């Protein structure tokens, strides 16, 4: 089974948690795209859902496939969000934002009664941090913000390259018009402490650590999909 087939398996298992009438947060990324495609088939067959997309990219795909969309201001309380992740550990702490959608993803997930993560098993790790942590920053003073991030990380004994994300020769901009700094810490043994340090920096808009937000993960491997709850 290749990676795409695993993503489809995870997405299909997550779809079983979706009921007609639900208000759904819809994630971003290649795994979330598979979920959108399967959801669209259900919608075409008569399932009624209203979706709040976590990115312009997801919004485009949903509209193309006939899924009804609302803004989060129209539907500020959602039943369920289904989204991918870049890494997840046994406590279901996540690193997200590889696609740059972390801010909207976190806002939407936190407005939902439940968040289910869908992933292939390559995303499961013992300790987070091999995947560079995306940190969304305001363009104003981003160099000063990068220095503040470096100092905050060093207080926790963390170090590593902090790279401004590029899209070709241009700076990458998020849907909200911010920049992303990808922080290669290697290992993040205390996600809560790092989250608190980052949140205290004025230029940091949001970071990609999702702590106590997901309550269920559906992980697909060659043998099929299994459901994991936070340890
Ligand atoms: O910003 C992007 C999101 O956090 C994605 O959920 C994450 O990067 C996982 O994406 P993929 O399913 O493509 O690995």
Image: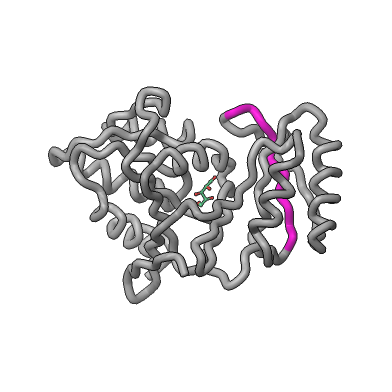
The residue sitting at 48% across, 35% down in the picture is: 55
Placement of 17 over or under 231, stated as above or below? above
Q: In the image, is 151 to the left or to the right of 17? A: right
Question: Residue 39: image x %, image y %?
Answer: 27, 45
| The quarter of the displayed image where residue 93 is located | bottom right
**Which of these two is toward me, 35 or 127?**
127
Q: Which residues are magenta?
A: 176-185
Residue 211 colored in magenta in the image: no
Q: In the image, is 103 to the left or to the right of 166? A: left
Placement of 175 over or under 186, stated as above or below? above
The residue sitting at 79% across, 47% down in the picture is: 149
Q: Residue furthest bottom?
A: 223
| The quarter of the displayed image where residue 94 is located | bottom right
Placement of 34 over or under 218, stated as above or below? above
Q: Residue furthest left?
A: 46
**Which of these two is toward me, 128 or 99?**
128
Question: Residue 5: image x %, image y %?
Answer: 36, 62
Check the picture and name the quadrant holding the N terminus.
bottom left
Residue 178 colored in magenta in the image: yes
The residue sitting at 81% across, 51% down in the picture is: 152
| Picture colour scheme | one colour
Q: In the image, is 82 to the left or to the right of 91? A: left
Question: Residue 140: image x %, image y %?
Answer: 78, 27
The residue sitting at 36% across, 34% down in the picture is: 77
Total tally of numbered discs in the picture: 0
Placement of 113 over or under 160, stated as above or below? above
């Amino acid at each position: 089974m290749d990676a795409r087939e695993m993503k489809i398996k995870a997405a299909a298992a997550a779809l079983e948690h979706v009921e007609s009438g639900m208000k759904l947060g819809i994630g971003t990324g290649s795994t979330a795209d598979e979920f959108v495609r399967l959801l669209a088939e259900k919608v075409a067959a008569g399932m009624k859902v209203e979706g709040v997309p976590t990115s312009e990219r997801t919004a485009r795909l949903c509209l193309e496939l006939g899924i009804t969309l609302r803004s989060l201001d129209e539907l500020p309380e959602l039943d369920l969000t289904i989204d991918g992740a870049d890494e997840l550990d046994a406590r279901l702490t996540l690193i997200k934002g590889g696609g740059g959608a972390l801010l909207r993803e976190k806002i939407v997930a936190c407005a939902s009664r439940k968040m289910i993560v869908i992933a292939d098993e390559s995303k499961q790790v013992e300790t987070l941090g091999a995947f560079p942590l995306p940190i969304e920053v305001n363009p104003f003073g981003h160099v000063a913000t990068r220095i503040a991030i470096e100092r905050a990380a060093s207080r926790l004994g963390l170090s590593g390259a902090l790279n401004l994300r590029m899209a070709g020769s241009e700076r990458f901009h998020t849907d909200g018009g911010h920049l992303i700094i990808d922080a290669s810490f290697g290992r993040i043994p205390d996600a809560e402490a790092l989250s608190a340090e980052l949140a205290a920096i004025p230029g940091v808009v949001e970071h990609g650590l999702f702590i106590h937000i997901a309550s269920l993960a559906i992980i697909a491997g060659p043998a099929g999909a299994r459901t994991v709850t936070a340890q």
